[in-house]
Image (tube, rainbow, N blue to C red):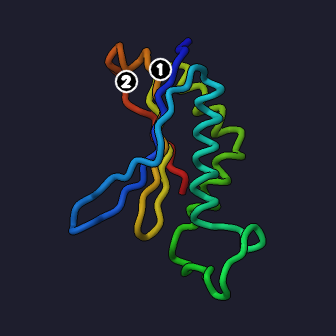
Amino acid sequence: MHDEFLCHVTAYGTCDGRRIGVPLGTYRAPTLALALWWLRDRAIWIAERLDPQPEGAPFPPNALVPVGDSVADVPALLRAWCTDVGQQELVADELANGRLVRVATHDDTTEYELLAESVDALRMQRTVPPLVVPVA
C-alpha cells in the first residue's frame, strides 16, 4: 500500500487566448484517509465560494443571481462527488493501487481540477494511465 500522497487543486481559465492554471492549494498527505479528506474539503471549499448560501453571510440585495440553465452547476457537482460513497471508494482504491486520480468539472469559464497521486508512484515513474473521473 502507498503511504503518502501528493494532492493539488487548480482552476483553469482562458486569458488572452491562452489556457492559464491558477493553483488553489497543494497538500502532502501522510495517509490515504487524509488525502481523501483534503480532496473533499477542497471540493467543498470551491463549492462554497462559487455558491455561497445567502443566509450564511450578509449579501447586498441582488448580489447573488442564478446562472442560465445551460451552465453546469459546479458547486452542486462538487458537493455530490463529496457525498458519493461509490466515487470515494473508487478514488481510494485507485490511490491505494498507486494510480493518479483526477476529478474535474467545469462551467462556462473555468475548469476545476483535483489531483492526487502516490508519492511512491511518482518515484517509480507511473506506467499505467491515470483514472479520470468526470463529475459532470
Q: CA distance from mark 1 to mark 2?
A: 9 Å
**Residue type at the position of mark 1:** Gly
- Disc 1: CA contacts within 10 A as few (<14), some (14-19) or many (>=20): many
At horizontal 71% and vertical 68% (from top left) the residue drawn is 53
Q: Residue furthest bottom?
A: 61
Q: Position of residue 109 (x, y in %)?
A: 40, 68
Q: Is residue 102 visible?
A: no
Which part of the image, by quadrant, shows the N terminus? Answer: top right
Which part of the image, by quadrant, shows the C terminus? Answer: bottom right
Residue placed most toward the observer, 69 or 18: 18
Residue 46 position by quadrant: bottom right
Residue for badge 1: 98
From the viewer's perspective, is 5 left or right of 37?
left
Q: Position of residue 58 (x, y in %)?
A: 72, 75
Q: Are marks 1 and 2 in contact (CB under 8 Å)?
A: yes
**Residue type at the position of mark 2:** Val
Q: Which mark is residue 128?
A: 2
- In the image, residue 18 sits, relative to residue 8, either above or below, namely below
Q: Position of residue 108 (x, y in %)?
A: 43, 70
Disc 2 secondary structure class: loop
At horizontal 61% and vertical 82% (from top left) the residue drawn is 63
Residue 41 position by quadrant: top right
